[in-house]
């Protein structure tokens, strides 16, 4: 393989696909690389950890000799980042990879591209189609609420519910739950009705990064038994699904009549962040005290001290105290426009609180006892 490439375009592509490279170097050494497939018309970069994979078409390359090659990912990204030449020539075969510019030359060992594992292509006739901008926002609003580890339920990813023209993404770690809803178009009768497939957090983050170019573009989503495929304008992303059962999220949504309070996103976030300065680092806790037309936030640390922050609000309900982990509140508020308002549904100090933004986003937080 031999190609002339625009350095910045190739760097961007390598950085995107590198997110699929495994963190564990001992898993399989060849997986620490990127596979490049060059034809007369295009160049595709491929990376996988055998759980998540991506094929990305890279623009701006002039293919002089079609072929396949294994490119050392970390060193290639470093070279592309540090080089100052606008164009570079890459020449590679099964034994070596050489990168040349006007003022530089790098030679690296390579491997046999036939040894690089493959994963499915998107050839489905049944799928849902979603606008890239809408899907990216839905991912941003949910993926941060996934669990890092889970034993009883499969919560280390985002659950997908797709049926007809509706799509829901749900994420929870057992202490908070994020629900984003949107519109989609079904083709060939594609549906997840009766199932709750969970896409791993790593795959969701990789997909989000690949949706930044054109919010008006569309994304095809096909969920099959044990795996999911996404097709964007430039990429195909593959992932195995998380094994296990997702919790019954509908059961935890409040059913009692709640007091609804309109909260300014920017002011609310600032007040919580200030109060959290004095919260214990190991088990952070802020008490939210709702009284007539006022929210008072109090945090008390055993050795750090005490904070008291007041925020004027429109509230005429009964006085209510409720304790939250402040990080769970801030993480949700920071993904919303600071000049917007969020609705807070509050029952009492022992029931979960629900934050709602517009008609398509809900965020449930469990109180601390």
Image: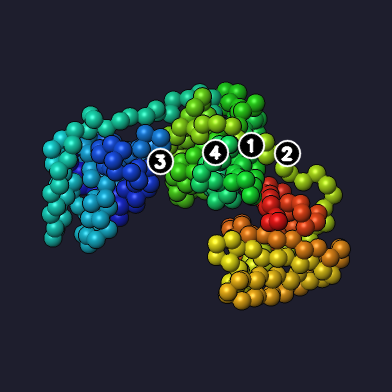
Determine whether 303 is above or below 98 in the image: below
Could you tell me how far apart the alpha carbons at marks 4 and 2 are, in whole angstroms? 20 Å
- Of the residues under marks 4 and 3, which one precedes in the sequence? 4
Helix, strand or loop status at disc 4: loop
Circle 1 crowding by C-alpha within 10 Å: few under 14, some 14–19, many from 20: some
Q: Residue at x 19, y 33 (%)?
A: 112
How did the renderer colour the structure?
rainbow
Residue at the extreme front of the image, as rendered:
302
Helix, strand or loop status at disc 3: loop
Question: Relative to residue 322, is residue 19 drawn left or right?
Answer: left
Circle 4 crowding by C-alpha within 10 Å: few under 14, some 14–19, many from 20: few
Determine whether 168 is above or below 296 in the image: above
Tag in front: 1 or 4 = 4
Could you tell me how far apart the alpha carbons at marks 1 and 2 are, in whole angstroms? 9 Å
Could you tell me how far apart the alpha carbons at marks 1 and 3 are, in whole angstroms? 34 Å
According to the picture, the residue beneath numbered tag 3 turns out to be 234
Helix, strand or loop status at disc 1: loop
Q: Quadrant of residue 331?
A: bottom right
Helix, strand or loop status at disc 2: helix
- Of the residues under marks 3 and 2, which one precedes in the sequence? 3
According to the picture, the residue beneath numbered tag 1 turns out to be 247
According to the picture, the residue beneath numbered tag 2 turns out to be 251
According to the picture, the residue beneath numbered tag 4 turns out to be 151
Q: Position of residue 237 (x, y in %)?
A: 43, 37
Q: Position of residue 216 (x, y in %)?
A: 53, 46
Q: Residue at x 65, y 71 (%)?
A: 300
Q: Quadrant of the N terminus?
A: top left
Q: Quadrant of residue 189?
A: top right
Question: Relative to residue 125, is residue 183 drawn left or right?
Answer: right
Q: Residue at x 27, y 32 (%)?
A: 116
Between 41 and 133, which is closer to the camera in this rendering?
Answer: 133
Circle 2 crowding by C-alpha within 10 Å: few under 14, some 14–19, many from 20: few
């Amino acid at each position: 393989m031999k190609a002339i490439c625009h350095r910045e375009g190739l760097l961007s592509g390598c950085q995107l696909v590198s997110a699929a490279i495994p963190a564990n170097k001992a898993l399989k050494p060849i997986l620490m690389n990127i596979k490049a497939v060059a034809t007369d018309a295009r160049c595709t970069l491929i990376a996988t950890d055998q759980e998540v994979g991506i094929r990305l078409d890279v623009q701006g390359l002039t293919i002089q000799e079609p072929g396949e090659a294994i490119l050392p990912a970390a060193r290639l990204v470093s070279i592309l980042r540090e080089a100052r030449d606008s164009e570079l020539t890459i020449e590679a075969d099964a034994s070596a990879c050489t990168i040349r510019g006007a003022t530089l030359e790098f030679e690296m060992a390579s491997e046999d591209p036939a040894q690089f594992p493959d994963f499915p292509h998107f050839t489905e006739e049944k799928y849902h189609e979603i606008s890239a901008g809408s899907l990216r926002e839905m991912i941003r609003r949910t993926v941060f609420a996934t669990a890092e580890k889970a034993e009883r339920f499969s919560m280390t990813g985002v659950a997908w519910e797709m049926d007809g023209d509706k799509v829901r993404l749900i994420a929870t770690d057992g202490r908070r739950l994020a629900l984003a809803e949107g519109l989609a178009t079904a083709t060939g009768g594609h549906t997840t009705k009766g199932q709750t497939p969970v896409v791993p957090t790593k795959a969701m983050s990789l997909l989000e990064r690949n949706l930044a170019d054109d919010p008006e573009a569309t994304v095809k989503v096909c969920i099959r038994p044990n795996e999911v495929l996404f097709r964007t304008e430039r990429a195909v992303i593959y992932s195995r699904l998380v094994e296990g059962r997702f919790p019954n999220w509908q059961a935890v949504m409040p059913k009692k009549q709640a007091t609804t309070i309109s909260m300014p996103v920017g002011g609310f976030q600032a007040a919580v962040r200030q109060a959290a300065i004095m919260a214990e680092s190991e088990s952070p806790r802020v008490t939210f005290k709702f009284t007539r037309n006022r929210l008072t936030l109090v945090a008390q640390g055993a050795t750090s001290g005490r904070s008291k922050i007041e925020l004027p609000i429109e509230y005429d309900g009964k006085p209510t105290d409720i304790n939250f982990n402040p990080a769970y509140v801030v993480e949700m508020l920071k993904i919303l426009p600071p000049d917007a308002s969020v609705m807070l549904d509050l029952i009492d100090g022992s029931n979960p609180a629900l934050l709602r933004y517009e008609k398509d986003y809900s965020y449930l937080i469990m109180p601390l006892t």
